[in-house]
Amino acid sequence: MASQQDRPNIVFITADQMRYDTIHALGYPWMVTPHLDRLVQSGVSFQRCYCSAAACVPSRASLFNALYPHSLNVYNNESRWGHSWIEDFQAAGYDTVSVGKMHTVPNDERCGFDQRMIVENKDHPPRPEEPHGGFFDEWDKYLIAHHITKPSRATYRATYPAYETALGAYEWSLAEELHSDVFVGRMAEWFLHERRAARPFFMKVGFPGPHPPYDPPDRVRHLYDDADIPIPVVTEDELALQPPPHHNYRQEMIEGNHDAVRWKADPSPDELLRLRRYYAANVTLVDEQVGRIMGALEATGQLDNTIIVFLSDHGDCLGDHGHIQKWTMYEEVVRVPAIVWAPRLLPQGQRVEAMIQHIDLAPLLFELAGLPPLENRSVQNALSVVRGDSPGRDAVYAEQGTERVLRDVALMTMIRTRAWKLVHYLDQPWGELYDLNNDPSELRNRWDDSRYRDVRSQLISDLLHWRIRDTLQLALW
């Protein structure tokens, strides 16, 4: 076990709702992401990393406990959680700080941090049932103290002329430095410059973007004025094969006002392109803050002894499959960008094609930091995949329960192998089955196709045995 003075610092950065196809260096040339490109080029990128839930809270609770949602009883964005394996780093002598979004429930749970500077969703509605109308984070307090009205679903709905066709994409109306992602980046930069302790630190940085509202400042938005970003073509045949909850969820997003997004049943190509350009610009804004953090580490002489992790909690359909946001098990939602940068400890420029779960990054960090191994049988150490000692996972899994916008689902569970994806809905005759070799875009649901009955039965059996085995392992742990 490494001594305290020999342990590396760790900066664990998460974006919110960032798709896997949003980093230039990973093969998406329309993106402007020079700082993430640097991490890719001199770090290890996991090309097929999968989150374990299709919404923020269960995905983050799973990630930071290295357990699946069923082991935590955290299935949706209303579920309570507030403990994590960061407590192990705290106990090992690390200074632990959280800057930005962690999405614990309640928002201010300690979760293993010595201090927290909380910035949550860019747009969250007042809660009349909570004291003073709900939780106010550091960003809220700053804007309130300076008599600035925060752009929100209320202001966009009341003042934005094209609200009904904007699809949640708006021009940022305040000074750029007041944007929540810049606010978080500057707080992280300030902490790195002002910190004086000799002990190693674990800093979690959580950016609210590119989660909607899709709201880039003009400077970064104009970088994409002519960007040729692919847009989806959604057919009636594809929609007809989707299970009933998908139809109801789409209607909820069309009629509702969730996260300042008013969806449309049939957005035009121009509307979709505009949406994706604004979203891409939000990603670039996050990328710039990653550069800000790396610059602060370099300026303070800490970069060479720091591990940087970059990850997203889940993705966003952005019109794929006729959907917006998350809460489904499509690749655009459950496959996430994942990079670990540690040039002194890991290969440089390695791209791992094997499948992993995002929870598999926890034991990698424990080993690189010289902590005792993470004793948890739900995870596989991603470091063994990097070293070539393991082929990765044969299957990855995700779980999601009822949400305010997903009322028709008691529990949906995904199994994804190299060739197939199945989504099981508890107590329902319908589901989803995709032949990934012949239909990698998941456009044709084969659940009711008699030719695939044996495959469906085998995958359901595999899913059942995984759930039983994981539950038993947790009981024996």
Image (cartoon, rainbow, N blue to C red):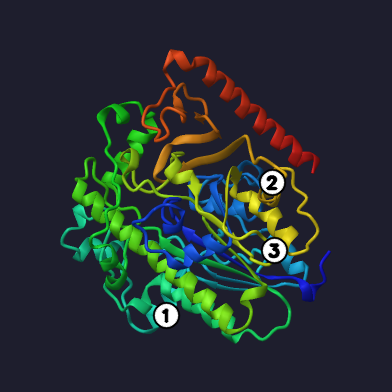
Residue 251 appears at what percent x and percent y? 29, 40
Q: Is residue 152 above or below residue 267?
A: below
Which of label 3 and label 1 is nearer to you? 3
Q: Is residue 449 left or right of residue 158?
A: right
Residue 273 appears at what percent x and percent y? 25, 52
Query: Toward the viewer: 355 or 350?
Result: 350
Residue 243 appears at what percent x and percent y? 39, 29
Q: Is residue 441 above or below residue 26?
A: above
Identify the disc placed on residue 201: none
Which amino acid lies under the numbered mark 3 shown in the image of this protein?
Answer: Leu
Q: Secondary structure at mark 2?
A: loop
Q: Which residue is mark 1?
A: 142
Which of label 2 and label 1 is nearer to you? 2
Q: In the rendered image, which quarter contains the N terminus?
A: bottom right
Residue 390 occupies quadrant? top right
Residue depicted at x 66% and y 40%: 391
Callout 2–callout 3 Cβ contact below 8 Å: no
Can you see residue 216? Answer: yes
- Local crowd size for mark 3, using a 10 Å CA cut-off: few (<14), some (14–19), many (≥20): few
* Residue situated furthest left in the rendering: 161
Residue depicted at x 30% and y 61%: 153
Q: Which residue is mark 3?
A: 345
Q: Which residue is mark 2?
A: 388
Of marks 2 and 3, which one's residue comes earlier in the chain? 3
Which amino acid lies under the numbered mark 1 shown in the image of this protein?
Answer: Tyr
Residue depicted at x 67% and y 65%: 112
